[in-house]
Amino acid sequence: MSDLGEDEKTGSYSIYFAEGEALAKQKQFQKAIESFTKALEFQPEDRPCLVERSKCHLQLGDTAAALADAEVSLKEDKAYHRGLYQKAETMYAMGDFEYALVFYHRGDKIRPDIKAFKLGIQKAQEAINNSIGSPAACKLDKTGDLSFFQQQDMIGKKRGKRRAKAAAATQQKAVGERKPVASDRAVKDVR
């Protein structure tokens, strides 16, 4: 088998890349991944191809592979906006909303004209607020069945009375068993 010329490599890369894009549009993500992988054999670390393959991995739920491809796409150029967006989307899908927010902000700083970064910032902030909750969103009222709390209060009061009686009895017993001391006689004499 002869070595492929530079034109043949570029042509093969383009064919596999285009095939991968077409398969991804048809939602045949596994086949698209295979095509992108073949394209990457001709041009390793090609950023657009890595981002597209990352999208397919993410669609299949393989967040680890999606993150790996997104990170490789940022290896040479940390400001590659498509790589930043894909990494942010992957982090969001993994539930790392804070890191996703960081990468959405980085992308927005580099390319403020792309609305996807602004939407990403908004959805990441909402996800963070939903996961930790905000005190303003929690409004308590007295409607509903509060009988459970009333029962707990009654049980607590009964226990409190029992404990108070037991403590009083223990104290009385302790006073009754105590040996008389000189100060007790002085108190009796004064009365």
Image: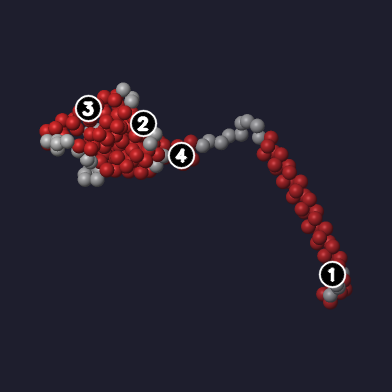
Dot 1 and dot 3 residues touching (CB under 8 Å): no
Circle 1: residue type: Arg
Residue labelled with disc 4 = 131
Q: Secondary structure at mark 4?
A: helix
Dot 2 and dot 4 residues touching (CB under 8 Å): no
Q: Secondary structure at mark 2?
A: helix
Residue at 20% in and 37% down:
42
Position of residue 158 in the picture relative to residue 179 (left or right): left
Residue at 31% in and 36% down:
54
**Quick one: quadrant of the N terminus?**
top left
Residue labelled with disc 1 = 178
Closer to the chain start, of discs 4 and 3, is: 3
Residue at 87% in and 71% down:
188
Which residue ends up furthest to the bottom in the rendered image?
Answer: 182
Closer to the chain start, of discs 4 and 1, is: 4
Q: CA distance from mark 4 to mark 3?
A: 40 Å
Residue 114 place in picture, x, y as percent: 25, 33
Circle 3: residue type: Ala
Residue 167 place in picture, x, y as percent: 78, 57
Q: Residues within 10 Å of mark 3 (few under 14, many from 20)?
A: some
Residue labelled with disc 3 = 18
Q: CA distance from mark 1 to mark 3?
A: 98 Å
Q: Which numbered mark, 4 or 3, is in the foreground of this view?
A: 3
Q: Which numbered mark, 4 or 1, is in the foreground of this view?
A: 4
Circle 2: residue type: Gln
Q: CA distance from mark 4 to mark 1?
A: 61 Å
Q: CA distance from mark 1 to mark 2?
A: 81 Å
Residue labelled with disc 2 = 59
